[in-house]
Image (cartoon, rainbow, N blue to C red):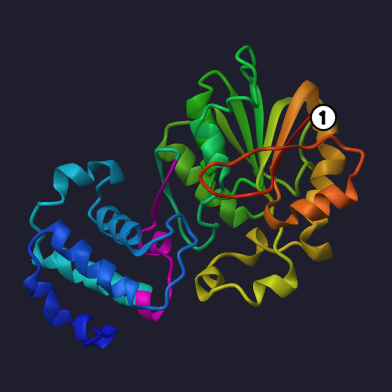
Amino acid sequence: MIIKIKDILTKDVIHEFSSIQDIVRWMTSCFSISNLWYGHGNNNPWDEAIQLTLSLLGLPPYLWDNVYKAKLSIKERELLYTKVCARIHKKIPVAYLTNKVWFCGHELYIDKRVLIPRSPISELINNKFKSILSKNQKPKYILDLCTGSGCIAISCAYLFPNAIIDAVDISIDAINVLEYNIQLHGLEHRVIPICSNLFNKLKKSTYDLIITNPPYVNKDEIRYLPKEYSYEPKIGLLSDDNGMEIINKIISKSFLYLKKNGILICEVGNRMLNVIEKYPTINFQWINIKNGGIGIFKITK
């Protein structure tokens, strides 16, 4: 006998659960036999279930070992059931169901005004930019270009406690989410939100480090993305010129805004070969990502 989703996704089933572990196991089964895409931070139904459950219960992910045997109230079970139905039937990503993600160990507010943080740049931050910045390099002025929720800017503020970070985005909606996250972390005097079309409102020769994860999906590709991506703002995904328009602007203008020996770190994903072909004379250092992800380069002024 093969279990079907209609057999186990019924509201009556929530009365059979007692603990967090019980509902996460059930949730994992539901996700496993549903046609879901895991591309927004998790890559399997178990982690997806843990994120959904703990986030809705107001618990950080690192507390799993301490709380998995804890009992759930009826109200909590009902809420979780409702969110599981939305995840399965509407394909809404977990982060938009909970309005919460963790990036580099830091909690962030997320809604449909911004992309869900998932950049492999997080690995570089977690590794303290080892082999990218020398031990003596402590950037004082950092630019997070195309900041979205501010995940990279806020994480860098924790990593470099003496740095000032300009967090730039063209979308005023994204800036509003960013401002909320800045206040959430008490970083009002160190992370500066700027609504700008890339470098337009910035001063030249300012930054020791520019980090950017710009849009690089082309119009043909977006039509074939799983439904989960349809909930994200297209302004954060799409770029003209076969996905290269914004990347080209960043490469051509970034050196004007870097100080001497300043560094640009840019994620271009599957546009990596396009970048290599278009700029054969630039010495790109392509960064190895151990936990998955391609197309992050470093160049030094």
Q: Is residue 260 above or below residue 199?
A: above
**Residue 90 is inside the magenta segment:** yes
Question: Horizontal placement of 300 versus 46: left or right?
Answer: right
Where residue 215 appears, as percent x and y from the top left, is 69, 56
Quadrant of the rendered image containing residue 71: bottom left
Nearer to the camera, 229 or 167? 229
Above or below residue 206? Residue 72 is below
* Residue ID at (82%, 57%): 245
Question: From the viewer's perspective, is residue 252 above or below residue 234?
Answer: above
Label 1 is placed on what type of residue? Lys
- Residue at horizontal 80%, vertical 65%? 242
Residue nearest the observer in this picture, 149 or 283? 283
Viewer-nearest residue: 240 or 2: 2
Quadrant, the N terminus: bottom left
Q: Residue furthest top?
A: 136
* Secondary structure found at label 1: loop
What residue is shown with label 1?
Answer: 204
Where's residue 11, x and y in %?
17, 80
| Residue that appears at 26% across and 71% down | 29
| Label 1 Cα neighbours within 10 Å, binned few <14 / some 14-19 / many ≥20 | some
In this picture, residue 137 sits left or right of residue 64: right
Residue 35 part of the magenta segment: no
Which residue is at a point 73% across and 28% down the rendered structure image? 263
Farthest residue in the right direction?
281
Placement of the C terminus among the 4 image quadrants: top right
Query: Which span is picked out in magenta?
Result: 88-103
Question: 251 or 147, which is in the foreground?
Answer: 251
**x and y percent of residue 267 in the render?**
67, 46
Q: Position of residue 128 (x, y in %)?
A: 53, 26
